[in-house]
Image (cartoon, rainbow, N blue to C red):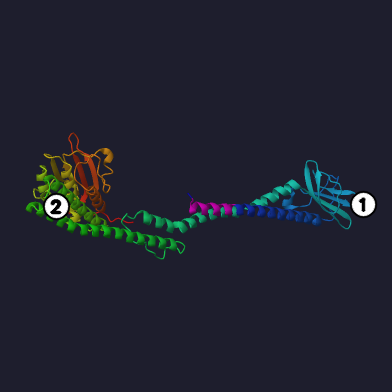
Amino acid sequence: MTSIRRWLLGWLIFGMAATSLVAAFAIFHTARREATELFDYELRTVALSLPSGLRGAGSSERHDPDLGDLADDRIVIEIWDSSGTLVYHSAQAPVFGRLPPGFNTVPHGDYHWRTFGVAQKDRYVQVAQPVSVREDLALHLALHTLWPLGVLLPVTIALVLLVVARGLAPIGGLSRALATRSIDSLEPLRLDGNVPVEIRPLVEALNDLLQRLHTASQAQRTFIADAAHELRSPLAALKLQLQAASRDGSLKGEGQTLERVEQRVNRIIHLVQQLLALAREDAQPVTSTVPVSLRRIGEQAVSDYSVLAELREIDLGLECEHARAPNDTYTVLAEPHSISVLLGNLINNAIRHTPPGGRVDVVLRRAGECVGFEVVDSGSGIPEAERERVFDRFYRGDGSKGEGSGLGLAIVARIAERHQLELSLRNNVGAPGLRVSVTGLRARDAPAPAAATN
């Protein structure tokens, strides 16, 4: 995967390093050449500044000239008089023959020497210096000219790293803003003064895409809601007409056939109601919570489904555990209608999948500052391989015997997601049946959690 950050840093650092090496090479050779010229100038200055009465070649008494720091550089001085006789020679130094005037580089022994000769009025002066000494000094001076570049390069690299990181920070911020959004958040991204001009087209394109997705999602939700609403009324009328015709004898047919037709109509009505409930939940991405009595919702749900439970010969009941008082209302912060739909779907699903003579219990439970509930049945349970798929829309297990649309648990999962609740399914241990747990409802008297920051 191509990375803009790595690409920028790689080429910038490589370019600076290559440029610095070329610059260092040029600076080094320029400084070395200038140092060599400086040593030639000093060699010429020594030759021209020697006193005229300097003598001492072959004599025990000699007075060497004061050359200052140049004595450490092994300067060799030779002087010939007008007759060509060597009248002065540096002590403990090799003897050179007389060379042509000017600068010369000659080998002598194991070294090369740089010489300068000049003819004066009554003498010839020749000064020599080892080339190795000159090169060592020139190298030392040249290296001294490179230390600012050696300091500048890492500082520049650090500055490039900082500038690139700061320059790409808006992209990282945009990525984090998109990554932390919920699946239902299709609001456009805000454009402020911190968004660079180069990123604005990307943000505007993303906002346009989000707007189109919002429009398409809203159209889908509207279609499902409208279709469910339009189908509910004629289906209810059809059921009433079917019942009326069956009672007055105007509809002829076997009783079993009429019963099957009525079951089909009931199933279609249930499907439409589930579609309408799902459309309503999808259309409400933001949950507004209010104090609500979970016990009252549970009692109402048990009352609403008691008739269905009696028809199927199922014992339906409500239990309260860890109550703070006999009349504990289990007040929580939630959306009343959604919690009612969630609990109703769980009870309905449990009744439909529990055989006659079975049992369905709704258990309210406190756990510290949180409140939850369980719906426990004595049905066939759900195989472990299907527990993740039962929340998919229109999915019904292979062994499912109940009458359903495959939307009940999908609606439950959607409501739990909106309320940020934890939903878990597990089969009963040592007994048949399923246990569906919903936890995470905050008690009304619990302290408010810290506000989340994006």
Few, some or many C-alpha atoms within 10 Å of disc 1 (few <14, some 14-19, many ≥20)?
few
Q: What's the residue at 57%, 55% (across, down)?
A: 152
Percent x, y of residue 281: 24, 55
Residue bearing the label numbered 2: 297
Q: Do tag 1 and tag 2 residues touch (Cβ < 8 Å)?
A: no
Q: Amino acid at mark 1?
A: Ser
Res 209 quadrant in image: bottom left
Which is more toward the observer, 340 or 17?
340
Pair 1/2: label in front = 2
Q: Residue at x 26, y 48 (%)?
A: 394
Tell which residue pokes out farthest to the right in this image: 83
Q: Residue at x 33, y 61 (%)?
A: 215
Q: How many residues crowd around disc 2 within 10 Å: few (fewer than 14), some, or many (20 or more)?
A: some
Above or below — where is 159 with respect to 136?
A: below
Marking on residue 83: 1
Q: Is residue 202 left or right of residue 273?
A: right
Query: Which percent across, then down, holds residue 352?
Result: 17, 44
Residue 149 is marked as none
Query: Which residue sits furthest top?
Result: 430
* Residues rendered magenta in the picture: 2-17
Dot 2 lies on which element? helix
